[in-house]
Image (cartoon, rainbow, N blue to C red):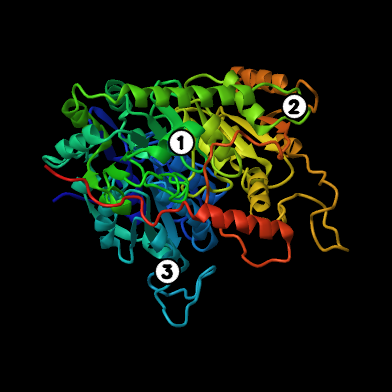
Amino acid sequence: MATRTMTVGQAIVEFLAHQYTVDGNIRERTIPGVFGIFGHGNVAGIGQALKQYSIDSPLLMPYYQARNEQAMVHESTAFARIKRRRATFACAASVGPGATNMLTGAAVATTNRLPVLLLPSDTFANRASDPVLQQLEAPHDASLSVNDAFKPLSRYFDRVQRPEQLFSALLGAMRVLTDPVETGAVTVCLPEDVQAEIIEVPEEFLADREWHIRRPRPDAGVIAQVARAIRASKKPMIIAGGGVIYSDAHDELNTFVTQTGIPVATSQAGVGSLNWDHPQCQGAVGTTGTTGANRLAKEADLIIGIGTRYSDFTTSSRSAFQNPAVKFININIASFDAFKHGSAIPVVADAREALTELTSELTGYSISSEYAAKSKKEKVEWDATVDAAFVDQKRVRPSQTEIIHAVQSASDAQDTVICAAGSLPGDLHKLWRVRSPLGYHVEYAFSCMGYEIAAGVGAARAGASPIVMVGDGSYLMMHTEIVSAVAEGIKFIIVLIQNHGYASIGHLSESIGSERYGTKYRFRNSQENNFETGDVLPVDLATNAESLGINVIRIEETSHAIADLHDAVKKAKASSRATLIHINSDPLLYAPDGEGWWDVPVAPISTLESTQNAYKNYQEALKLQRPLLGNGVIERE
C-alpha cells in the first residue's frame, strides 16, 4: 500500500481538503476552510501545515483569520446554517485559553444541532515539558486537561495521543459532522508535540471521500397511522421546526398544507418553512408567538411537530396546549425528539420524505370549513395588529417594532436577518415577515450574546446577504469580527440598536418583580451602591465601530429617525462595503403581545411589593402548565 511521509498537522489539513458532503444531487466540500489563531500549541503543527499548503497548493485548504476563538466557531456555525448543514469550517486554537475560548461556541453549535469541527491544541503527550505553559494541573488526574471541558459540549470527542490514532479520529469526526441526527460540535484534541510528529499516511486516506447525508423514510405503515389520526382530528395544527429547513422540505410542506388546509406555526429555527403571507402560515408559536398561532395551539386536538425539539419557548413552558384531548405526532429524524413528551405517534424520519408520503396518504382530505375560517380570521387579526404597530410614530427614539419594520421594508426577499440575544429575538420571531427559506437566522437554542456579528460574517461567507440586528449589550460582548469583515472585504449590514442597557432582561426583571435591577448602563452611584440612578454612560458605539474600519451611518434623534433608518439600509445595501447603522431606541416601548408565557420562577417571599404582586401572577400562570405535552395514545385500527 502506497504511503506518504508527512507530519500529523499536514495529514489533517490534506485529509480535510478531500472530504465531500453529498445530499441528493448536491455535492460540496465538507470543510472548505480553516479558521486559526496560532500560539505555541499549534503554530508548528496545524499552523505550519496551512502555511506550507498555502505555497505548494494555495487552493487546497484556505486559511482565514479570526479575532477571537469563540467568534470563529460562531462564524462556522452560521455558515453551516446557511449551507443547511452540508458544510462547515474547522477551527484551530492554541493550548489553554485559546482552546477554552471555543467552549461557548461549541455549546452554541451543539444545542442548535449545527456541525463545526474544533481542533484545540492540547498539552504534551510525551510529558517531556510538564507542566507546559497554560497547562491546567490536576493532582488527582494527570491525564486531565482543559480540553476535557469540551466533552459535554461535543457530539464527538477524541484526543490524538499517538500519530496512528489520527485515522480513526478523523473518520469518526467526519461521520458525526455529516450525520443529521448526531451532528453538532466535533472536537479532536491535538497535543502540540503530536501535531509535529512524523506519520506514514496511506494514499487512500488522503483521496477524495464522499459522505452521504441520510434521508430516511418513515417505517412501513406509520404514515397510514398518522393519516388516520389527522382525519379523525377536528383541529389539527403543525409546528414546523429547523428540521424543515435542514431537510429542504419547503416545497413539500407547502404542497401538504395547501392540500389539507392545516395551519402552520413555527419555532425560532423553523421560521422560513413557509413565507409569512402563505394562507396557512400563522407565524411564531409559544412564548414569543403570535396571537393567531397561540390561540390555535390552545384549542388544537392534534399537534403535528415536524423537525422541532419542543423547547420551552415553543411550548410556552408546556402551557400552550390546553385542549384536554390533545395528542402529539412528532416527525423527526432524531428518535430523541420524535419520542419527546409522550408522543402519540413518534415518526423517526426525514421531514421531506415524511411529508411526501403523508401528502399522498391524505389525498382528498382537508380541514373543515369552520376550522379553516377560524384559522384565516386569526391570521388576518394578527397581521392587522402588526400593521398597526409598524406605523411610524415619529418618535425621536422609536420603538424596536418600528425599527424592525424600517429594516424589513428596506430589505430584499433574499436577505437574511441575523440575531441571537436580548429582546430582539422575541420581537423578530413574531414580527419579521420572512420571504425566503433562508431569510431568517435567529440563534435561539443557546441565545448567545455576542453571536450576531460573527454569525453575519459566517453567513456572508456562505453566500447569504446578511442583515445583523444587535443590541448594545450583545454588541459589547463581541464585536471583534468587524475587523475580519473589513480585512477580507466581506459585505454585510449591522443595525446596532442602542438602548443603554439590557432591554430583554430589564423587561423580564420588571415582570417578575425585580424592577429592572442591574440592567441599566449607568454610572455607579457610590452612596446607594448601585447602577440604577446614575447618569447614562457617555459611550459612543458608533465611533467604536468606526475605529475598527467599518463604514458607519448614524441615525440622529429626530422625528424622522425611522425614515432615515429605512434610507440608511437602502444606502448600505447599495454599498460595496460592510456598513454599521447606529440608532437609539426606547426600551420601554414593547411589541404587540402574542399571549405566550415563559416559566421564570418568582420569589415567594419578599419585602418588595412588586415581587409580591408578581408571585401572585406566577401562581395563576402555573395552573395552565401541563406535566406532559401528550396524554395517551391514539387508537389503532
Q: How many marks?
A: 3
Q: Nearer the viewer, residue 632 or 317?
A: 632
Q: Image height check: is 291 above or below 310?
A: above
Can see residue 62?
no
Closest to the camera, between mark 1 and mark 3, is 1
In terms of secondary structure, where does tag 3 sit?
loop
Residue 361 at x, y = what percent?
A: 16, 29
Q: Amino acid at mark 3?
A: Phe
Amino acid type, residue under disc 1 in the picture: Arg
Q: Give me the residue at 67% from left, 60% from top.
A: 612
Q: Residue at x 33, y 38 (%)?
A: 243
* Left or right relative to 338: residue 31: right
Q: CA distance from mark 3 to mark 2?
A: 53 Å
Residue occupied by mark 3: 124
- Residue 162, given in percent of the width and then of the height, sits at 30, 65
**Residue drawn at the location 31% of the way across and 59% of the way down:** 198
User: Does residue 583 appear anywhere in the picture?
Assistant: yes
The residue carrying mark 2 is 555
Q: How many other residues sit within 10 Å of disc 3, few (<14), some (14-19) or many (≥20)? A: many
The residue tagged 1 is: 295
Assess whether mark 3 and mark 1 are in contact (beta carbons under 8 angstroms).
no
Residue at image coords 43%, 39%: 267
- Above or below: residue 38 compared with residue 130: above
- On screen, residue 254 versus residue 494, left or right, reads left
State the image coordinates of residue 215 (x, y, percent, origin top left): 22, 38
Q: Secondary structure at mark 1?
A: helix
Please identify, in this view, whether the residue under mark 1 or under mark 2 is nearer the observer.
1
Mark 2: secondary structure = loop
